[in-house]
Image: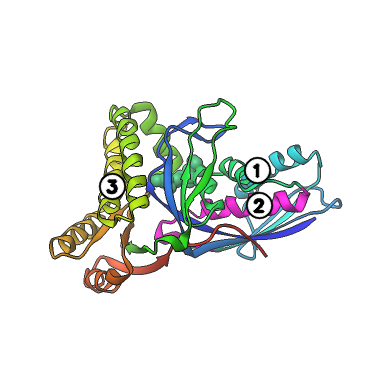
Amino acid sequence: MKATVKAHTNIALIKYWGKRDEALFLPTNNSLSVTLDKFYTITTVEFLPALQADEFYFNGELAEEKELMKISAFLDRVRANAKKPMYACVKSQNHVPTAAGFASSASGYAALAAASAKAIGLQLTDRELSQLARQGSGSASRSIFGGYVEWEKGSNADGSDCYAQQILDKDAWDLRILSVEVTTKAKKVLSREGMKRTVQTSPFFAGWLEAVEQDLIAIKEAINERDFTKLGQVVEANALKMHATTLGANPPFMYWQSATVEVMQEVQALREKGVEAYFTIDAGPNVKIVCRPEEEQVIHESLETLPVVQQIHHCRIGPGITYL
Ligand code: 2P0
């Protein structure tokens, strides 16, 4: 009745931006990510007949009531599925620098889904785990798998055809991701709220949906052909289009800070000098850079000269969930 799972974060190369069903976390578009080796969550779940309620320890401390409620709601699905009304003790250790703007919810819910399913005795396939993790946080559906991963939006109302799957093994194409932390004081619009507002109010959202279809075709070609230039161009353009939708929302919002733009411009300047680097940005001010191994160092050296850059984390493409 006890299981421990390690799950890694992921970074979307084609963004998940918009839900068609908020309760079931069904997206409006497919997304495509790479799982990262460096940042992960380790979660232990133990179902105990003696417990009167769920317990949740996060990084060694008893979590706040609000966090516990989210975990309990997630465990309710697992209990209902297993038909075992038993409470659990959940202990989660996060190895994700939250300031770096990585969604720890991706690794967190992937680890929780796999550990809770195993602990309660459910035998789920990775695809079913992806569907379960999705109902904690959309991007968690992708973190079940390692390497290059596509999350299928599906079309069924119950989400039965909405899951992620690996499209290429991590060792098949060695790309590197640099996570560039910048100085910021801004309070961000949470991605869940930002996504919702954009879907409901941005006239650019229809354009996003149209463009993302083309971007998916192009990136899958680039991955099949191991064409880095093509991949990089699609990644950068896709992130810019996602962020453009936020400017059209009502009220409008923007995840970038001036420091974000400085890093973006440095990446573009590097390309003018012949160094191939491409950026992507999530629902926050930090920038992630995609590059080939041979150019990782020169990109690092160039970025660390910028006063707005606080820290640079280097990642490789990482594995899917592991049972410890
Ligand atoms: C992504 N993001 O594809 C996109 C790009 C942010 C920008 O997934 O509401 O925490 O829990 O499903 O997964 C962040 O949103 O949102 C995210 P919910 P999630 O990685």
Residue 170 place in picture, x, y as percent: 46, 60
Q: Which SS does the magenta portion mostly show?
A: helix
Q: Which mark is residue 74?
A: 1
Residue 82 place in picture, x, y as percent: 77, 41
Query: In the rendered structure, which disc, 1 or 3, sits on the residue that comes first in sequence?
Result: 1
Q: Which mark is residue 17?
A: none
Quadrant of the displayed image that contains ligand 1: top left
- Residue at mark 2 to residue at mark 3: CA–CA distance: 32 Å
Q: Nearer the viewer, residue 157 or 189?
A: 157
Q: What residue type is labelled 1?
A: Phe
What residue range appears in magenta?
Answer: 95-121
Above or below residue 183? Residue 212 is above
Residue 99 place in picture, x, y as percent: 42, 61
Residue located beneath label 3 in the image: 234
> Which residue, as the protein is rendered here, is positioned at the far front?
225
- Location of the C terminus by quadrant is bottom right
- Residue at mark 1 to residue at mark 3: CA–CA distance: 35 Å
Residue located beneath label 2 in the image: 114
| Magenta residue check for 105 | yes
Mark 2 CB lies closer than 8 A to ligand 1: no
| SS at mark 3 in the image | helix
